[in-house]
Amino acid sequence: MSNNTCFHCGLDATSSTITFDNKSFCCNGCKTVYEIFSINDLTCYYDLQQAPGATPKDVEGKYNFLDNAKIVEQLLEFNNDDTQIVTLYIPHIHCSSCIWILENLNKLNPAISSSVVNFGKKNVRVTFNSESLTLKNLVALLSSIGYEPFISLDDYSVGKKHVDRSLIYKLGIAGFAFGNVMFLSFPEYFQVDGFWIEKYKPLFRWLMFFFSLPVVFYSAQDYFISAFKGLRSKILNIDVPIALGVLVLFVRSSAEIIFDAGSGFFDSLTGLIFFLLLGKFFQQKTYTFLSFERDYKSYFPIGITKITLEGTEESIQVYDIEKGNRLLIRNEELIPVDCILIKGTARIDYSFVTGESKTVSKQSGDKLFAGGKQLDGSIEVDVLKSVEQSYLTQLWSNDVFKKDKELSFTNITNSISKRFTIAILLIALTATSFWLLTDPSKALNVFTSVLIIACPCAIALSAPFTFGNILRILGKKKFYLKNASVIEQLAKINTIIFDKTGTITANKETSINYEGSELSLDEETLLKSTLRGSNHPLSRSLYNILNKHDILTLDTYEEFLGKGIEAKHKDDNIKIGSASFVGHTSDTATLNTTVHVSTNNQYKGKFTFYNAYRKGISQLFNTLKKEYDLVILSGDNAGEKENLTKLLPTKTKLLFNQKPEDKLEYIKYHQNEGANVLMIGDGLNDAGALAQSNVGIAISENVNVFSPACDAILDASKFNQLFNYIKLSKSAIKIIKWSFLLSFIYNSIGLYFAVTGQLAPVVAAILMPLSSISIVAFTTIATNISGRKLN
Amino acid sequence: MSVIYILLAISIIVAVGFFIAFIVAVKKGQYDDSYTPSVRMLFEDELVKDNSDKTILTKKD
């Protein structure tokens, strides 16, 4: 353990002098957490993982809304006299130490009886006694050890969420029945004639019948429901031939054992449903730590502090905010409604909304929009609109958010199943009429055999296994898809639309250009020393790029809010800030963010801040332009236009000053013209566009923080791989088509047995698993080979 | 040969027993989180009670 990193959080601690127990800490917060742990014998925390902690944030007053009993009531999952259960989402959970410390919370406070971590979901379920520990204190306790929970408006009604586990039950039942039926069918496979088998045959057959009952009536019910729904809306989906096959299998097998005509096909029947459900289960890859359904509610706080007419503070629910209320927004709190700033200096971070990470300064009287985060102390505001009617949240009343994208899309399996079903019915009818003429006793046998053998198990399995595997491959490459149908949609894309800020530009980097007369060494030193004192984000980024200089002690230093800084050292005077502030009037209006400098009342020049574009963007656009129409829809002004035209291929369309609704309408318009749109965005202002597009991808620098509702989340570091990911989805479609071909071959072989009237149960029992397993093997190998091309 | 009835009965009872165990496990949420338990089982309870001797990193040296 080196001594220059913080023992608790692993950050650089070279410049700090805080030590405790011979260990160095970067700040007092980290030291306090260590103290808490060492007093309570919890220092094992540091053995499981090196420097696992996070610096605790000051949460004074932030959770005052948890004093409101109505809010607390909604958050609790279980609430009885002395037992309360709450599930809290904690973004910091990242390693085994986190699990360990959070499951040992009872050692920190005896009122906590147990706590269980779900690592995948990053949440902890705490059982506690609210008489000795209120929810607010529990949250404060967690915050004090660096595990601050995130409570948003989304949690408000979560308490009683139902977990759907029916697929696991269905799969379990089908698997159980399949195994048992297989054992029971074995004696008859070998057709040993004799006294023994004759005696026990009926018993074995009836046992199989009873095992198959729950499979047909419970496990397979989704197929019947889906087929029925499809037929009602006149669509022949893949579930129609499946349901038909299952039904015929069951009826014929039951008839056979009732009339003692044969052993039936219960083995094939249960196996078929088991494999189909297995495919469904495999495709259902979910990323528990991601959410694709977020709207503004996931960002907004539950409660906020209201200042009553008498001047006292009161916590109220966000939905209870009314026009004209006076609210207190504390440091680091989110502004939930459109309002007017009354008191205090506002520095608002709108990065949730726009993706732009630069903060905006506002003075009293200015309008503040919902969704911004206050960064500089407390402010007081007057409410202009309620939550639902605010500028940002209004977007969610658009119809597009009520539509389910998956329903309005015919997937590849269903598009083939229509022709398939018709063909099978034709074959069945032709073969039956042929046998009716030649040997009527076999006609019914042939008819049912065709329907049984044609049951498109292999076809139905191709897509789930291919897509399931592609989902996993892409997931490993940090491209997280919501479900399998996104892959299909992605393969059909012909237009790609990008948001600008935060999507094609990186959030953390800016590039700065200097124009004007060169600064002397003295002037540069003075500039750097002056910037050092300022906390303004522009000053900070400018300070970081300037060369190292000795730091001067300034004689005077004054910061003029929203204008600039003035400082004096000996005889030299420096002004840094807006053009008018430094006395530069001939400045041609520029749309970019600039900082001007003058020394001794003489104008020197300006620093222009550019967004730094993501690496490889030029190359990506050049590869994409061959196959796709490219558009950039930006909510910002046209300041970057010149830069972008230089950087991107000439036929890329650039549109600026687009409001959230404009983006949505633009996509809708082009979809009506027949375009299949892929939208790539990041902020809440892209939420409408992401929902409207055929595929909406949210770019995220850290997938654990929030991104708007979308179909896929792409890690920003993999942005330049986008083309390869789209290509992979196209090869997935190709693989599925090949496996369709393969299953047709199996079907033809089976149909030969069926139409000639010689389908024995053992043939079906061999052919069915063989076709399924070979399809699964084929798709798995093929997808892995195409996945290997990604790097 | 009637021993086959007993054998069948036993085999089905055993199978159904496991099946019920499976249903109960799913119902209790054992399949909801397939990662955390794998980490949890590696924690040793003794470490907490008697930590000053056994912790490695926090030893004063």
Image (cartoon, rainbow, N blue to C red):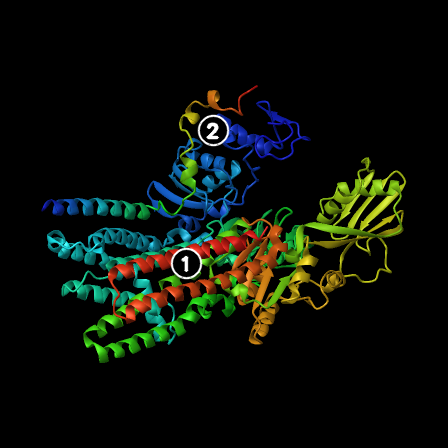
Question: Which of disc 2 and disc 1 is earlier in sequence?
Answer: 2
Q: Position of residue A778 (x, y in %)?
A: 44, 56
Is disc 1 placed on a helix, strand or loop?
helix
Say few, some or many: other residues with alpha carbon within 10 Å of mark 2 (under 14 / 14 to 19 / 20 or more): many
Tell me the amino acid under the disc marked 1: Ile
Q: Position of residue A553 (x, y in %)?
A: 81, 35
Using the numbered discs, state the Cα–Cα distance from disc 1 to disc 2 in whole angstroms: 53 Å
**Chain under callout 2:** A
Q: Can residue A302 be seen in this view?
A: no
Q: For this rendering, which residue is in front, A216 or A286?
A: A216
Please name the residue that numbered disc 1 is placed on.
A775
Q: Which mark is residue A593?
A: none
Name, please, the residue furthest toward the bottom: A437
Q: Residue A42 carries which label?
A: 2
Q: For this rendering, which residue is in front, A640 or A282?
A: A282
Q: Which of marks 1 and 2 is in front?
A: 1
Q: Position of residue A564 (x, y in %)?
A: 78, 50
